[in-house]
Structure formats: C-alpha cells, structure tokens
Image (tube, helix red, strand yellow):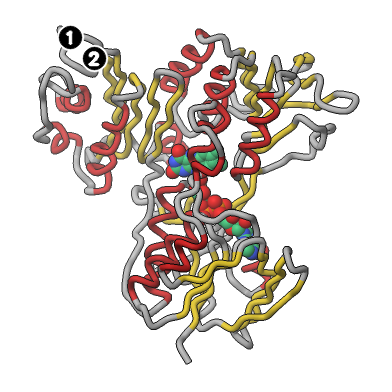
C-alpha cells in the first residue's frame, strides 16, 4: 500500500505542501481536506476584487481541484477535519455536502489550517453590513453590498496593511471612507515618520483617519447605520474589520501539537512540530525572525508558500529547511508604494538593540526623465557592528519593490558600508545614477 500524506487546509500553505510533496515523491498518495468551497486562491488579491480591478472572485483561483487531481493530488472541499488521532494515525473528516463523517489514515500530516480574522466582542458586530475580508466569499459579499448602491459611507476598522488596501478599494467604488485605528499611528509595524506619509496621502484623497481610538459600537436597526468611535457617531452603511488575525491552532493543539510564545504552532526549520509525522505551514505557524532569532508571528502569503514547500518536501522523505523571516512586505496605497523589511526603530527600541538611522528623500528616476516621483528610503543599522537591521520605503507604487534589495542585504548580514558598495543598475527611466538606496547607505557611511 502506498504511504499517505494528508494536508489539512487548501490555500497557500496547504497546496504548496501538497504540490511539492508530489514532485518530491510520486509514490505517496496525497489528499487535501479543505473546510471551505475553494482551494488555492490568491487571498492577497481580495482588496482588488472589492475595488473592482478584478472582475469576479473566480479570477482569484490559482488552481481548481480538477487541476490538482490531474497532478495526482486528491482534493476534498467542504470537508472539515474535526479530529487528528495520532495513536491510530487517522483524521476524522466531516464532508458537509454529503453530511457524512469519515476517517482517513495517514503516514504524515501537514497542518496548514491558516488563520481567521479577529472579531472583537463589540456591541453590534453581528449586524448586517459589518464584514471581515479573508475568503473569496467575503470579498464577493462586500463587492455586492457596494454594487447595491446602498453604501455611501464606510468605516475601515484597523489601519494595518489590509485596512489601507481597503481604503483604496472603497474609494475606487466611490464610497466615503473613515479609518479608525487604535494605535497613535496607522501601519503599526512601521515607524511613525514613514506611516505618517501614507496617512497624509490617504487624507489628501478624502479618507478621514482617526488614530488613538477604537470602535465602541456598531449601531443600526436591521443593518449598519452608524459606527461609534472615539465618542462620536460616524454614519456608515458598511464596515470592514481589519484588525489582525488569529492562528487556527485548536485542532492541532487537541492532538498534542505545541504552540510557541506567539500562540501559533511551533516548528523546527524542517517545519516539523513536536509530534512525529506532523508538519505545519502558513498562517497557523510561527517563524524565527532572521535578525533577532526570536519566534515571531508575521502571517504572509510569501511565507506560507515557502513553509509549505519545505513541509511538503520533508513530509514525504525529502530534505529541505526554512530558515525564517524578515517580515518583508509591500502594499499599494493609492499611487504610493509602502514597503518594509527587518526591524523598525520601534522593534529595535523594544529589544534594546543600539541602532542608527539613515533616512533620505530623493527621486525614483533621473530628475530630467518624465514621470519621476519622490521616494523616501530609511535604513536601520546596528550602532556597533554596523549590520543592516531593516529598511522602509515610501515612494510611487512602481518604485517600492526596491525593498527586496534591502531584504537581501539584511538576510546576508551585510553592513551598511557593504550595502553602499553594491553594484545596482542605472538608466534614467529606472533610477538616478545614485539609486536612492545607495544614497541612504552613503548617508550612513559619511
Ligand atoms: P489560509 O489562507 O488561512 O488557509 C487556510 C485554510 O485552511 C482555510 O481555507 C481554511 O478553511 C482551512 N481550514 C482551517 N481549518 C480546517 C480544518 N479543520 N479542516 C479543513 N480545512 C481547514 N500576504 C502577502 O504576502 N502579501 C499580500 O499582499 C497579502 N495581502 C492580503 C490581503 C488580504 C485581504 C488577506 C486576507 C491576506 C493577505 N495576505 C497577504 C496574507 C495571505 O493571504 C495569507 O498569509 C495566506 O493566505 C496564508 O495561507 P494559509 O494557507 O497559511 O492560510
């Protein structure tokens, strides 16, 4: 009998694990169980489904179940794993469409159960018109509400990456937007000097940004009419909760799988959990931070894909490692691109790491070339070793992917002086002769 790999969860982490496992060892029988109706979709595209750039939710699907089947990977949708029985090596699965429960044996298991949006117990949070955004169905529901013509004003709760992307999406749909953020700044992982540039841009586009206050209640008779925040009532027919996610760890924990200090599943660099034969990947798992060496929970699609490949390889007898993360991330905020990697000033301060900052404002192309835009680059480096610790960029959205060069340098443990010596490409339509990243590094060298 062939050996059997069961993968729980069919989005980024789970499908990456299954596909890589099949490529690594074709002898194994592989089956994905997914609670929802879709597998393998681009969750990162959801704000653009809401905003109308993407026509319909099906366009976000990367691969349909039949495409996995053609590759020799079994897929069961609407099938929730209810229990992992490690003593028998079995999972118990409820197939919602048939209304039946079945048990399936496994020789190895990948837990890729992801995360769910955090929904705080605020009065009125269950009212019609209050949404979360996690799945294609969530995106479609928001889009349909917007297209009904009944929504004139919306509140985005949370000023993180998804909150900012939602502001753009709602503006694109012609809706007035208020953003409410509990912290004193939007984009909490970034430093305030960088986040403020984004806030100014949102405000210029008409978004009312309220920081330092939380939502106290959602009010309305049958559906949402008002959001109470910071002591005032904001008229709104739609609200989106974008205040973070919680890892789905309950199923794994019940089977004896350990979580780490972040509350997400702990794994070694082979993505093995403490339970033999059980691997993990994606938003349900924590990772090591490559600068601090601490476990962190920074759930991102890029990370889920990489962890999934490693978990899938090792689950079927291969050998691969996942070293950790820098939290490298990028978003589009109207015409701006906002990106970060590694530590922020806030992170360094919290850990007592001595650091210095080199921050410059330049242009993203030669000044004489049409269409050049301002760009702000901020580098953080260790005061004594001069190792690069992190970077942040705000620029026109076409220019912020420069962050990848900084991420590579942080990964390679380069000093800011080494970084200043990098041989970056130049031509007037792409950058000034001194790329703004080098100008920032040179500021530190001086
Ligand atoms: P999930 O996507 O959460 O998938 C886990 C799956 O497991 C779910 O479908 C769930 O139904 C299923 N499941 C859970 N429990 C069970 C069970 N017991 N039985 C069966 N199935 C189960 N990341 C980026 O890097 N860049 C971006 O630009 C970006 N933008 C984003 C925008 C939005 C609006 C959102 C919501 C996320 C964004 N992300 C982005 C994050 C990225 O989408 C996630 O990191 C990624 O989806 C994680 O994949 P996953 O497979 O680990 O988890």
Q: Residue at x 54, y 31 (%)?
A: 160
- Tell me where residue 174 appears, x and y as whole percent: 60, 14
The answer to whether residue 283 of the structure is visible from this angle is no
Task: Give above or below for 402 relative to 33.
Answer: above
Task: Give above or below for 101 relative to 188.
Answer: below
In terms of depth relative to the viewer, which is nearer, 160 or 5?
A: 5
Alpha carbons under labels 2 and 1: distance apart = 7 Å
Mark 2 Cα within 10 Å, few/some/many (few <14, many 20+)? many
Helix, strand or loop at mark 1: loop
The answer to whether residue 234 of the structure is visible from this angle is yes
Helix, strand or loop at mark 2: strand
**In the rendered view, does 132 fall on the left or right side of 356?**
right
Marks 2 and 1: CB-CB under 8 Å? yes
Where on the picture, by quarter, is residue 293? Answer: bottom left
**In the rendered view, does 13 fall on the left or right side of 147?**
left
Write down the residue under mark 1.
367
In terms of depth relative to the viewer, which is nearer, 182 or 82?
A: 82
Q: Residue at x 41, y 43 (%)?
A: 327
**In the rendered view, does 80 fall on the left or right side of 162?**
right
Where on the picture, by quarter, is residue 211? Answer: top right
Please tell me the numbered disc located at residue 126: none
- Tell me where residue 316 appears, x and y as whole percent: 40, 78
Please tell me the numbered disc located at residue 363: 2
In terms of depth relative to the viewer, which is nearer, 156 or 222?
A: 222
């Amino acid at each position: 009998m062939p050996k059997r790999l069961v993968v729980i969860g069919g989005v980024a982490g789970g499908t990456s694990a299954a596909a890589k496992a099949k490529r690594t060892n074709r002898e194994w029988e592989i089956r994905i169980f997914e609670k929802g109706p879709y597998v393998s979709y681009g969750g990162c595209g959801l704000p653009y489904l809401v905003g109308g750039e993407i026509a319909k939710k099906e366009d976000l699907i990367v691969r349909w179940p039949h495409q996995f089947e053609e590759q020799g990977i079994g897929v069961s949708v609407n099938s929730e794993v209810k229990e992992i029985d490690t003593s028998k090596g079995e999972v118990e699965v409820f197939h919602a469409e048939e209304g039946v429960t079945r048990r399936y044996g496994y020789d190895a298991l990948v837990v890729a159960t992801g995360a769910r949006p955090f929904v705080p117990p605020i009065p009125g949070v269950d009212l019609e018109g209050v949404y979360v955004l996690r799945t294609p169905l969530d995106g479609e529901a928001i889009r349909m509400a917007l297209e009904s013509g009944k929504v004139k004003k919306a509140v985005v709760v949370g000023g993180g990456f998804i909150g900012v992307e939602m502001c753009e999406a709602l503006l694109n749909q012609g809706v007035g937007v208020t953003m409410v953020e509990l912290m004193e700044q939007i984009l909490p992982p970034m430093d305030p000097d960088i986040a403020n540039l984004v806030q100014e841009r949102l405000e210029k586009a008409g978004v009312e940004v309220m920081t330092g206050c939380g939502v106290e209640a959602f009010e309305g008779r049958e559906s949402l009419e008002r959001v109470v925040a910071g002591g005032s009532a904001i008229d709104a027919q739609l609200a989106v909760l974008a205040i973070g996610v919680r890892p789905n760890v309950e199923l794994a924990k019940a089977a004896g799988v350990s979580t780490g200090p972040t509350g997400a599943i702990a794994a070694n660099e082979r993505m093995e959990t403490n339970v033999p034969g059980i691997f993990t990947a994606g938003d349900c798992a924590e990772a090591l931070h490559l600068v601090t060496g601490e476990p962190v929970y920074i759930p991102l699609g890029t990370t889920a894909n990489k962890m999934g490949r490693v978990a899938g390889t090792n689950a079927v007898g291969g050998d691969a490692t996942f070293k950790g993360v820098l939290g490298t991330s990028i978003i589009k905020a109207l015409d701006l691109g906002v990106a970060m990697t590694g530590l922020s000033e806030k992170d360094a301060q919290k850990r007592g790491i001595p650091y210095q900052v080199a921050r410059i404002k330049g242009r993203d192309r030669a000044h004489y070339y049409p269409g050049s835009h301002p760009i702000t680059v901020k580098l953080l480096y260790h005061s004594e070793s001069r190792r690069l610790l992190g970077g942040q960029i705000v620029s026109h959205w076409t220019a912020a992917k420069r962050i990848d060069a900084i991420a590579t340098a942080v990964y390679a443990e380069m000093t800011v002086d080494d970084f200043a010596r990098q041989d970056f490409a130049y031509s007037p339509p792409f950058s000034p002769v001194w790329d703004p990243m080098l100008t920032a590094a040179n500021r530190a060298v001086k």
